[in-house]
Image: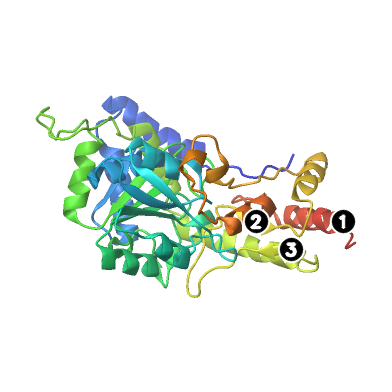
Amino acid sequence: MLPVTRPSLPELAEFERLLEDIWQSRMLSNFGKYARQFEEKAQRYFSNPWTRALVNCDLGLVLSLAALEIPEGAECLVPSFTFNSTANAVLWNRLRPVFVDVDPRTFNVDVADLERRLSSATRAIVVTHVFGSACDVGRVLALARARNVPVVVDAAHAYGATYHGVRIGDAGLGAYQVFSFSGTKQVTSAEGGLVACANEDLATRIEFRRAYGFQNDYVSRVLGVNGKISEIHAALACLSVDPIEEVVAARGRKAQRYREALGGVPGVRFQEHLPDCRATYKDFAILCPRDRDLLAERLMAEGIQTKTYFRPLHRMPLFAPYRTSADDLGDTEAVADAVLCLPMFNDLGDADIERVGQSIARFYGCV
């Protein structure tokens, strides 16, 4: 079976060397040596000293919204075409999600629709870099600044992505930008996350909230949780993140081979990227001209795993009550009904890509 994703791991001997160090130190957590190293590597990579590590991206999103201290019941704009975690974080903070439509070319938030939905009740904006392709965060931030509304970015897929030549994670690209290092990502710590903050004050708020609400003295000053990344996960991250530039470049080449392999299939469309922006290709997604589900079944029968991803949040039982009759989310529904993620991982071979392309071409009668 050709999987839709597969994690890349460092040499086991390298990881064992770090594990031996952890075993000897008996320091398993509590912001130890490797958690600090992970943070420092990310800080250098982003050129952002206000980057903090935590246990996973989900909690990073929850704590980022909590750190903004938004009143309960306030409205938060959020795309419907994103992973469940994005909107879960809104609800965990007792905010009201207002769903925004997608740009059918980029699969990212439709900034014009976001502007239409901005109101005096809007107290936060959450956007996603879908599949590691940068949304137009500059335009989003300009709208947000005009209304004095903070922006939290779900950058789960975007470690290694750039926006107009600037690395996602730069302090100027959102109040909080939250990254994932779970096993499906381009580089992984098995489970882990980073929050890149816009300034020292916002970073301090995360530091308190990821550590029970206190710092060093056991005296809680805000509501916090145990958000510490373990030393074992952080050690794996320290080994995994170093080759990120090579990883993203290689995935870009694989994406181009997919485009070439599928270029002769009428109606197949690809995610478009903003000019002067680099995508990570955490996923490689196509829009199918028709019969997406039948195609997925055919590929599975031929030993090729795919994923219909994302599914519109506003259609789900948890989130559907927040959609109003006036909402027009037609582009989100059209993209979600046609999107199919094809196998994409770091050691995916050219022959595998050719096989997938030929199978899709056969399905649509092109060979």
Whichever of callouts 2 and 3 sits on the residue coming sooner in the sequence is: 3
Residue 60's x, y, as percent?
34, 42
Task: Sort mark 1 into few (<14), some (14-19) or many (20+) by Cα contacts within 10 Å.
Answer: few
The residue labelled by disc 3 is 268
Q: In the image, which is nearer the foreground, mark 1 or mark 3?
A: 3
- Left or right of 325 in this view: 136: left
The residue labelled by disc 1 is 362
- Left or right of 156 in this view: 71: left
Question: Which amino acid type corresponds to the residue marked 3 in the rendered image?
Answer: Val
Residue toward you, 310 or 52: 310
- Extreme-bottom residue of the structure: 275
- Left or right of 359 in this view: 180: left
Residue 199's x, y, as percent?
20, 57
Question: Which amino acid type corresponds to the residue marked 2 in the rendered image?
Answer: Ala
Task: Sort mark 2 into few (<14), some (14-19) or many (20+) by Cα contacts within 10 Å.
Answer: some
The disc label shown at residue 334, or none:
2
- 243 is higher (above) or lower (below) than 237: below
